[in-house]
């Protein structure tokens, strides 16, 4: 049976991962968090003591870097060279380094191949920056989630606090602005809304509101397999 692919793109802090996870759970299909893959490459670069923005250094470790994902009850685990690193990926410095390594075309092509493979084998909700424009241009539905910078800063600050990272609002704001710049201005597969993506501004909306808004646009699932 044909697999369904739902693409959710947008800037950091727009609510993509929460919404994508909940929509996938509702549909009982996999949630593919592509940011986690960039974060895993970034973690390796940091572990090796390399500079995430040094193209040559990053490319040099790619052939010996193995990124894998597995699913259990729909939950994604990310493996770096055989080790489960899922719990290490949300650290602020890893996010920053992920945005830097994501500029490098060789990194992107390696991960995009993996992402396309997964989407070929499973029905998925995929969140990222270039899913609707580059990774899965024929996705069955595309969404572009945004929110004001203030709201994104507030959400990211809360997330970091819950995870035990003590960052000031001002630092989170600076970091998000830098990430927006990196993600939108890179030459290869930058963050932008696909022409056929449905735009949803999540500012001031509850998670449930956004999930039901997304679900309103979904096709009849009975035509698809998992
Ligand atoms: O969604 P996230 O914060 O986990 O993503 C971390 C970084 O990875 C983000 O700043 C840009 C990059 N990324 C990307 O370039 N393309 C994707 N499809 C997903 C993430």
Image (cartoon, grey):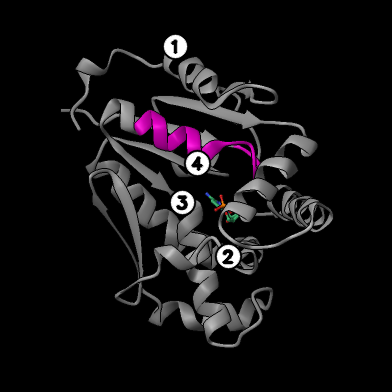
Q: Alpha-carbon distance for marks 4 and 1?
A: 18 Å
Residue at horizontal 69 percent and vertical 62 percent from the top: 166
Mark 3 vs mark 4: give the one in front: 4
Q: Which residue is mark 4?
A: 17
Against 35, residue 88 (above or below) is: below
Disc 2, disc 1: CB below 8 Å?
A: no
Q: Earlier in the sequence, mark 4 or mark 1?
A: 4
| Residue, disc 2 | 91
Circle 4 SS class: helix
Q: Could you tell which of marks 3 and 2 lies nearer the N-terminus?
A: 3
Counting labels gives: 4
In the figure, is residue 29 to the left or right of 149? left
Q: Disc 2 or 4, which lies upstream in sequence?
A: 4
- Residue furthest left in the image: 1
Horizontally, residue 77 falls left or right of residue 55, namely left
Query: Measured from the top left, where is residue 137 in percent x and y?
Result: 46, 35
Q: CA distance from mark 2 to mark 4?
A: 16 Å
| CA gap, disc 3 and disc 4 | 10 Å
Q: Is mark 3 within 8 Å of ligand 1?
A: yes
Q: Which residue is mark 1?
A: 216
Q: Earlier in the sequence, mark 3 or mark 4?
A: 4
Q: Is residue 22 left or right of residue 4?
A: right
In-front residue for pair 92/44: 92
Q: Which residue is mark 3?
A: 34
- Can residue 126 be seen from the camera position used here? yes
Q: Secondary structure at mark 3?
A: helix
Q: Quadrant of the N terminus?
A: top left
Q: Residues within 10 Å of mark 1 (few under 14, many from 20)?
A: few
């Amino acid at each position: 049976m044909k697999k369904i692919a739902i693409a959710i793109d947008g800037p950091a802090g727009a609510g993509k991962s929460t919404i994508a996870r909940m929509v996938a759970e509702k549909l009982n299909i996999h949630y593919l968090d592509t940011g986690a893959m960039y974060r895993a490459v970034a973690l390796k670069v940091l572990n090796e003591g390399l500079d995430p923005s040094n193209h040559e250094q990053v490319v040099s470790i790619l052939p010996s870097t193995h990124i894998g994902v597995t699913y259990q009850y729909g939950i994604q685990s990310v493996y770096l060279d055989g080790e489960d690193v899922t719990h290490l990926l949300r650290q602020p410095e890893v996010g920053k380094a992920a945005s830097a390594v994501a500029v490098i075309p060789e990194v992107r092509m390696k991960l995009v191949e993996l992402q396309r493979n997964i989407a070929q084998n499973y029905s998925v909700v995929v969140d990222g920056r270039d899913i609707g424009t580059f990774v899965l241009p024929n996705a069955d539905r595309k969404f572009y989630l945004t929110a004001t910078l203030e709201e994104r800063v507030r959400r990211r600050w809360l997330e970091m606090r819950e995870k035990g990272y003590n960052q000031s609002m001002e630092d989170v704001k600076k970091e998000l602005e830098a990430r927006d710049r990196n993600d939108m201005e890179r030459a290869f597969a930058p963050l932008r809304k696909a022409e056929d993506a449905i735009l949803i501004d999540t500012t001031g909306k509850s998670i449930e509101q956004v999930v039901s808004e997304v679900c309103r646009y979904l096709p009849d699932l009975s035509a698809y397999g998992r």
